Image: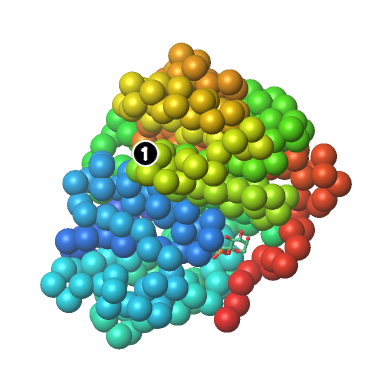
Amino acid sequence: IRRQPELWHQTIALVKEKREWIREQFLDASPEEILFTGCGTSYYLSIAAAAIFAEKTGFPAKAVPASDLYLKPTSVLSPRRRTWVIGSSRSGNTTELVRALQTAERQFAVPCLGVTGNPESELARQTTTLLLPHIQEKSVVMTGSFTNLLLSLQIITAFIAEDERFLEELKHLADLGDQILAKSEEWGRLLGEDRTRDRTVYLGLGANFGLACEGMLKLKEMTQEVSEAFNPMEFRHGPISILDERWRVVLVSDRSLTSFEETLVRELKETGAEICAIGDGVATLGADRPLDLSSGLSDAARAALTVPALQWMAFYRTYQMGLNPDRPRNLNPVVLL
Ligand code: F1P
């Protein structure tokens, strides 16, 4: 978790060198729509990337689990639209992802771009691939690979949108890394070690839904505690009825939604749940435990900076419970079919 800022610098340097090549891939595909895909953590980062891509480039973009693309391709690929598929995978060997891209390329003639940390992988062998070898991890649970894969997709977005300001913001994110990671660790440790609440729901809208899902997955994998993820407004349409004093809510905040979030936090507090909020300027939302990152970055650029706090929270809780955060039960580093 702690080495992420150093890796962010490496990711930026590496992907920047590929600027022309990435633009060529995009122009060759000449897409009318972009489909981001992956499994587990790599699917969740795809959700965040798709929302940011759509917002920045104006192209329709969505994320689907690789299994949808592999097993129900016609439910996600349309013969009426030229699609470009971007598949992410730390290992590059997850069967559903490898087969999803095979299906798209071979059966539907849809061009695909893989992004992986593993140059020796199936993905790297069979697909046009952007390689990020420095993101490999010993842990089963993905942490630094999440933020680095996401960052690489954000840089690709900036290239395609020709948005130099966004690119500058992403570079600045890496510079802010150490300072924000330290702040996030303190917050994550306090929350993780406080076991007065043993159920957690993560809320995020748009790109932040992908981050909320990742927070949910980190806690679930590492601690096997009950954790959920919802869009914050959707959560009010039924799921809110689960909340009581056993629950903790972690809101991944979006600066453009402040007035909705203030109302939401008030409403959530009435349930007895403890309300936490992460983002820029969250100190004024009225949450019980805010983590104000004060990064000064836009919501689209800040995404990866939000995630270490969620990782620390799960990590410290796992220690508190006497479990090994690197080796969750029932889980392998690569899921095969
Ligand atoms: C994705 C994944 C992770 C999960 C575990 C096993 O792998 O399913 O989401 O946490 O680490 O692998 P990958 O396709 O990105 O290698």
- State the residue position of label 1: 233
The mark total stands at 1
Quadrant assignment, res 209: top left
Pointer 1 local density, CA inside 10 Å: few below 14, some 14–19, many at least 20:
some
Quadrant assignment, res 84: bottom left
Task: Residue at 33% x, 34% y: name it.
Answer: 166
Task: Residue at 53% x, 21% y: name it.
Answer: 287
Q: Quick one: quadrant of the N terminus?
A: top right
Q: Depth check: give the residue in front, 300 or 74.
A: 74
Residue ranking furthest to the bottom:
107
Q: Looking at the image, can residue 63 be seen?
A: yes
Percent across and percent down for residue 247 are: 62, 37
- Residue 185 in the image: above or below residue 142: above
Q: Is residue 193 left or right of residue 284?
A: right
- Residue 323 in the image: above or below residue 183: below
Task: Residue at 82% x, 44% y: name it.
Answer: 321
The residue type indicated by label 1 comes to Met
Quadrant assignment, res 232: top left
Q: Quick one: quadrant of the C terminus?
A: bottom right
Q: Depth check: give the residue in front, 94 or 323.
A: 323
Task: Residue at 71% x, 54% y: name it.
Answer: 224
Element carrying mark 1: helix
- Residue 128 in the image: above or below residue 247: below
Q: Looking at the image, can residue 25 be seen?
A: no
Percent across and percent down for residue 226 are: 64, 50
Q: Is residue 203 left or right of residue 183?
A: left
**In the image, ligand 1 is in what quadrant?**
bottom right
